Image (cartoon, coloured by chain):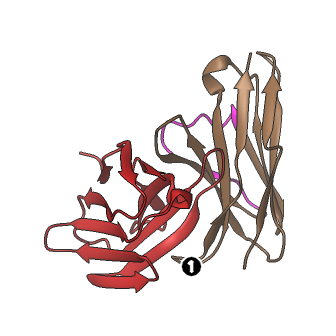
């Protein structure tokens, strides 16, 4: 079983839609959760991060962690064509390394 | 914010030759840098942890003699792919920084071995 699982998509939505991106993880000891955005042929950039359970909101983006079900989510409201990218969930492991999900490719159509 | 510069962004080389990729922290010192590899439509896989002034720590399954890492200063780490073969073609990305949320990624190097 992979430590972090993410549906690779692709996911295509119309402009203005609400997007839901999700990951599951296997180790209940994980505490630090992140979402990275990666544009084509570029390195990832940190988008959101949360510690332990709960929600965190930043503009149109909301990150959510449910530790009871080992499930992490990223919601994008009022999606824009500029949001088209690959979104990777990541977890900071107990060994001090980032473990990435496979990434979900999102396309927002005008 | 922290800036990590990676060079070159794209390189094509012949099979059997070696290629060097540079990763620089521009406005901070980095005692630790990480090197990742990413295949198309796949996740970032950690290859090795580069430590300034000491040997790199490689992940299981990564050939240290093929992927030579040198972290000679607090702002520069290099990855050399030796005797490259077509199966080494991939997107290589470095990161540097510190703390759980503090790592910044370079823009990546697309290596194509022909």
Colour red maps to chain? A
Q: Residues within 10 Å of mark 1 (few under 14, many from 20)?
A: few
Marker count (numbered): 1
Is residue A6 among the parts visible in the rendering?
A: yes
Residue at (72% x, 26% y) in the render? B112
Q: Residue B27 appears in which quarter of the rendering?
A: bottom right
Q: Which residue is mark 1?
A: B99
Q: Chain of mark 1?
A: B
- Residue at figure coordinates x 76%, y 15% from the top left: B15
- Which stretch is magenta? B54-67
Q: Is residue B60 magenta?
A: yes
Residue A75 screen position, x and y as percent = 34, 69
The x and y percentages for residue A3 are 30, 53
The one of A27 and A79 positioned closer to us in this rendering:
A79
* Image coordinates for residue A37, horizontal then vertical, percent: 52, 60
Chain B: drawing colour: brown
Question: Is B75 colored magenta in this rendering?
Answer: no
Q: Quadrant of residue A55?
A: bottom left
Q: Is residue B76 left or right of residue A73?
A: right
Rendered view: A87 above or below A96: above
Quarter of the image that includes the N terminus of chain A = top left
Asked if residue A102 is positioned above or below residue B65 in the image, the reply reads: below
In the displayed structure, does residue A80 sit left or right of residue B96? left
């Amino acid at each position: 079983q992979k430590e972090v699982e993410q549906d690779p998509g692709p996911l295509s939505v119309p402009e203005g839609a609400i997007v839901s991106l999700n990951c599951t993880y296997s180790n209940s000891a994980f505490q630090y959760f992140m979402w990275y955005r990666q544009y084509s042929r570029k390195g990832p950039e940190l988008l959101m991060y949360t510690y332990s359970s709960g929600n965190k909101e930043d503009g149109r983006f909301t990150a959510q962690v449910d530790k009871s079900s080992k499930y992490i989510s990223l919601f994008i409201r009022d999606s824009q064509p500029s949001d088209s990218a690959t979104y990777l969930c990541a977890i900071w492991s107990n060994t001090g390394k980032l473990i990435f999900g496979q990434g979900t490719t999102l396309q927002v159509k005008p | 914010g922290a800036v990590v510069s990676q060079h070159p962004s794209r390189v094509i080389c012949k099979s059997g030759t070696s290629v060097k990729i540079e990763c620089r922290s521009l406005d901070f010192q980095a005692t630790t840098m990480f090197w990742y590899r990413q295949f198309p439509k796949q996740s970032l896989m950690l290859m090795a942890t580069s430590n300034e002034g000491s040997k790199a720590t490689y992940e299981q399954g990564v050939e240290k003699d093929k992927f030579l890492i040198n972290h000679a200063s607090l702002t520069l780490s290099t990855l050399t792919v030796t005797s490259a073969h077509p199966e080494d073609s991939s997107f290589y990305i470095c990161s540097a920084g510190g703390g759980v949320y503090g790592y910044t990624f370079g823009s990546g190097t697309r290596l194509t071995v022909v």
